[in-house]
């Protein structure tokens, strides 16, 4: 009998009708699905909404009675119905849950609870507090309904979508003109080394707007902070700069560290042409001919070019040896070591010290010369083998020719002997 009851209970649990009856009734969704126009949208987006997926529903934000099918009863203020909050109420409206640690531990302990506090300290929040209607609120970036996780590629705050989300305001001249802000940041970023990596190659490790400006605490990095912002990714470069003579000079002149040479949104891929005293060098924008900085720039560029010259010669030799079919594994290893030193040398440009770069250049040159020497040795060995092959072929040809002559002589001798045997003998 016990087994029978257990089977019946399991059958009821697995029965679709039982599951449906156990679900919470939601007249909000059922009603809004049937209406036309703008009010129908929230109901159609419910399935994708991260709040619905965590067990929250319309009533958790808007209040009311989701069990009542009559609209007046469902939206009765006496039952806690709040309706649609005004735009100026939204940050605090969302903060009712998102700033409450107890609530967030219940639904998603991984989410921080300081977003609202950060927002109030941000450029957006400060403008919002004085009644600026142009600044974004929570739904400007996350939307109101159908809110997706930041890990969802369709979310407006997914890494590859963040630049476009920010650009929805920051590329709008009707908004930015009122605040004296440019509208070219998104275009510049899309052409930068960072934007190319994120937007065109899909590299989500590349920085986006929030990486440098923050998200909820969005702010313009001040001069003193730019080096620290860039150091989130470029830590060695920043450490070298901090120990260089440029650090004190930038502080004295109030100049941002990285931005002076690399820019901000339109950051191009660094090139060797940026260093030195050539037409495209950034050093000459501050250092006059004959100055210590000018001479140092020349020396650093010269060290890089000398290593590149040695590497180019080595690469040509290695390529030639490889085309001849010789084993160039050791030479290729030395070339890779030389390239590593060249990369390090380019990084250590930020020390702004020719003496610091010199041993790196010497080490790279050592590997390049070894690679070239090994490749040329392989080429010589190839020619030696080829010469030896020709000598061997000539010797073989002579031996074969000698054998052929010997065989021919033997054939002639045998033929003569046969003729002698068949000739008439002297009767006497």
Image (tube, grey):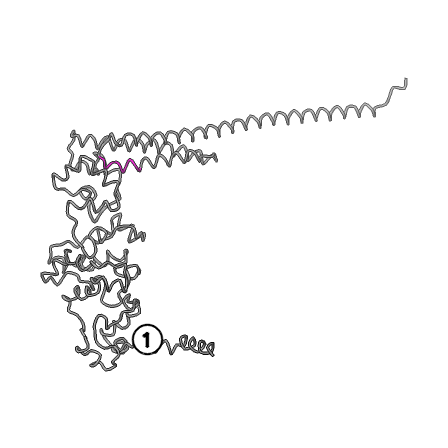
Q: Main secondary structure of the magenta part?
A: helix
Residue stretch rendered in magenta on the structure: 343-351
Q: How many marks?
A: 1
Is residue 344 a member of the stretch shown in magenta?
yes
User: Which secondary structure lies at badge 1?
Assistant: loop
Q: Is residue 412 left or right of residue 327?
A: right
- Among all residues in the image, which is located at the extreme left? 130
Label 1 crowding class (10 Å Cα cut-off): few <14, some 14-19, many 20+? Answer: few
Residue 308, position as x, y percentages in the image: 32, 33
| The C terminus - image quarter | top right
Residue 208, position as x, y percentages in the image: 24, 52
Res. 302 image quadrant: top left
- Among all residues in the image, which is located at the extreme top? 428
Res. 246 image quadrant: top left
Judging depth in this view, the residue of 307 and 217 nearest the camera is: 217
Res. 311 image quadrant: top left
Is residue 104 a member of the stretch shown in magenta?
no
Tag 1 residue: 23
């Amino acid at each position: 009998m016990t087994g029978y009851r257990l089977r019946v209970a399991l059958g009821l649990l697995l029965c679709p009708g039982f599951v449906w009856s156990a679900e919470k009734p939601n007249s909000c969704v059922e009603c809004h699905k049937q209406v036309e126009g703008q009010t129908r949208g929230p109901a159609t987006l419910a399935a994708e909404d991260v709040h619905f997926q965590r067990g929250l529903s319309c009533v958790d934000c808007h209040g009311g009675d989701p069990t009542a099918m009559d609209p007046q009863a469902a939206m009765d203020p006496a039952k806690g119905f709040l309706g649609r909050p005004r735009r100026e109420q939204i940050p605090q409206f969302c903060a009712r849950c998102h700033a409450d640690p107890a609530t967030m531990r219940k639904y998603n302990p991984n989410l921080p609870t300081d977003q609202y506090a950060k927002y109030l300290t941000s450029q957006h929040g400060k403008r919002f507090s004085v009644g600026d209607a142009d600044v974004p609120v929570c739904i400007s970036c996350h939307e109101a309904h159908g809110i997706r996780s930041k890990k969802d590629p369709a979310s407006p705050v997914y890494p590859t979508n963040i630049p476009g989300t920010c650009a929805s305001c920051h590329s709008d001249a009707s908004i930015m003109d009122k605040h004296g802000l440019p509208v070219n940041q998104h275009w510049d970023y899309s052409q930068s080394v960072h934007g190319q990596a994120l937007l065109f190659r899909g590299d989500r490790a590349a920085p986006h707007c929030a990486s440098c400006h923050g998200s909820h605490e969005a702010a313009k990095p001040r001069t003193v902070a730019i080096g620290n912002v860039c150091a989130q990714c470029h830590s060695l470069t920043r450490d070298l700069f901090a120990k260089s003579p440029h650090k004190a000079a930038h502080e004295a002149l109030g100049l941002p560290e990285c931005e002076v040479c690399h820019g901000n949104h339109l950051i191009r891929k660094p090139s060797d042409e940026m260093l030195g005293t050539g037409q495209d060098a950034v050093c000459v924008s501050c250092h006059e001919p004959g100055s210590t900085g000018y001479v140092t720039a020349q020396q650093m560029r010269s060290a890089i070019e000398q290593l590149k010259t040695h590497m180019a010669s080595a690469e040509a030799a290695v390529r030639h040896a490889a085309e001849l079919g010789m084993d160039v594994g050791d030479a290729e290893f030395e070339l890779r070591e030389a390239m590593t030193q060249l990369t390090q040398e380019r990084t250590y440009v930020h020390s702004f010290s020719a003496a610091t770069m010199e041993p790196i250049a010497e080490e790279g040159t050592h590997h390049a010369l070894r690679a070239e020497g090994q490749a040329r040795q392989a080429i010589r060995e190839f020619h030696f083998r080829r010469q030896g092959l020709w000598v061997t072929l000539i010797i073989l040809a002579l031996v074969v020719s000698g054998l052929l002559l010997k065989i021919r002589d033997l054939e002639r001798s045998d033929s003569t002997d046969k003729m002698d045997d068949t000739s008439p003998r002297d009767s006497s």
